[in-house]
């Protein structure tokens, strides 16, 4: 499996709240959160790892360049400031062309290590007609969650801005996709679509077969107060709720 990490945000809220380190270098379970993700990807058989950071994150870029020397797989570092997370996603997905299925996550998506491998295995072993597998969670603490409606076969039928009866999941910020998703992303950018949730809606509208995978509890680190709670969460056990 090929993996990517979007780490191109400014992390302005953490800085405003007194956190001096760039968000990707904030420690969770004793490791910079971006290094923790890389460790998990390597354990899950990474064929390649690609990461995008913005041009102001020189400290993060330096950390990654040093870490790359120890990795057992090809590593791609994109240093580029992008206007939206969708543009960052495009920069990484373009590196995945011709490589089959891939998984991209945001750097501040925090999950227990033991919950990730079953998701990767399920996506790797999914039938060829499955174009993507999105990690979802029933734990909702995001300020603006993206609700994920599913059918009886866990096929994703819609991405919603507000809750609806019978919808129990929200997006976990972990996107497993195939090469069929890349042209849709290019079309969205050409049309001026600027939000990841609208891109995901476009995938459904274009007929791609996306499945939801319940990965248990997933949290985001958006505020300084989230750091301690995320750290306690990942230390509390290897299997999610």
Image (cartoon, helix red, strand yellow):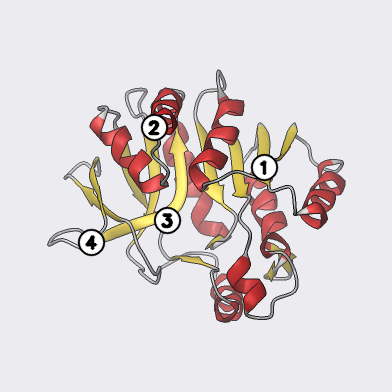
Check the image and report above or below for 121 versus 227. above
Mark 1 and mark 4 lie on one chain; the one further toward the N terminus is: 1
Which of these two is toward me, 68 or 81? 81
In the picture, the disc for residue 172 is 3
> Of circles 3 and 2, which is in front?
2
Q: Is residue 1 visible?
A: no
- The residue located at (65%, 37%) in the rendering is 46
Mark 3 and mark 1 lie on one chain; the one further toward the N terminus is: 1
> Of circles 1 and 2, which is in front?
2
Q: Is label 4 in a helix, a strand or a loop?
A: loop
Q: CA distance from mark 1 to mark 2?
A: 22 Å
Q: Is label 2 in a helix, a strand or a loop?
A: helix
Mark 4 and mark 3 lie on one chain; the one further toward the N terminus is: 4
- The residue located at (16%, 45%) in the rendering is 152
Q: Residue under label 1, please give it.
A: 51
Which of these two is toward me, 32 or 80? 80
Q: Is label 3 in a helix, a strand or a loop?
A: strand
Crowding near the residue tagged with mark 3, few <14, some 14–19, many ≥20 C-alpha atoms within 10 Å:
many
Q: Residue under label 2, please give it.
A: 188
Q: CA distance from mark 3 to mark 1?
A: 19 Å
- Quadrant housing the C terminus: bottom left
Mark 4 and mark 2 lie on one chain; the one further toward the N terminus is: 4
């Amino acid at each position: 499996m090929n993996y990517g990490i979007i780490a191109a945000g400014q992390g302005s809220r953490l800085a405003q709240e007194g956190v001096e380190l760039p968000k990707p270098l904030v420690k969770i379970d004793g490791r910079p959160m971006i290094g923790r993700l890389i460790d998990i990807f390597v354990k899950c058989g990474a064929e390649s790892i690609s990461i995008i950071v913005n041009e102001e994150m020189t400290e993060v870029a330096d950390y990654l360049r040093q870490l790359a020397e120890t990795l057992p797989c090809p590593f791609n570092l994109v240093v580029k400031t992008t206007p939206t997370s969708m543009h960052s996603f495009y920069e990484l997905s373009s590196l995945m062309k011709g490589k089959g299925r891939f998984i991209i996550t945001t750097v501040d998506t925090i999950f227990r290590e033991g919950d990730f491998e079953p998701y990767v295995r399920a996506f790797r072993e999914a039938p060829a007609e499955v174009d993507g597998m999105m990690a979802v969670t029933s734990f909702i603490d995001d300020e603006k969650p993206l609700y994920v409606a599913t059918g009886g076969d866990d096929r994703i039928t819609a991405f919603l801005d507000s809750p609806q009866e019978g919808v129990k999941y929200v997006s976990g910020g972990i996107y497993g996709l195939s090469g069929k998703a890349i042209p849709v992303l290019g079309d969205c950018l050409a049309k001026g679509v600027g939000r990841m949730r609208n891109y995901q809606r476009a995938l459904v509208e274009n007929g791609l077969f996306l499945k939801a995978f319940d990965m248990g509890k997933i949290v985001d680190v958006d505020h300084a107060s989230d750091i301690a709670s995320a750290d306690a969460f990942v230390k509390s056990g290897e299997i999610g709720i």
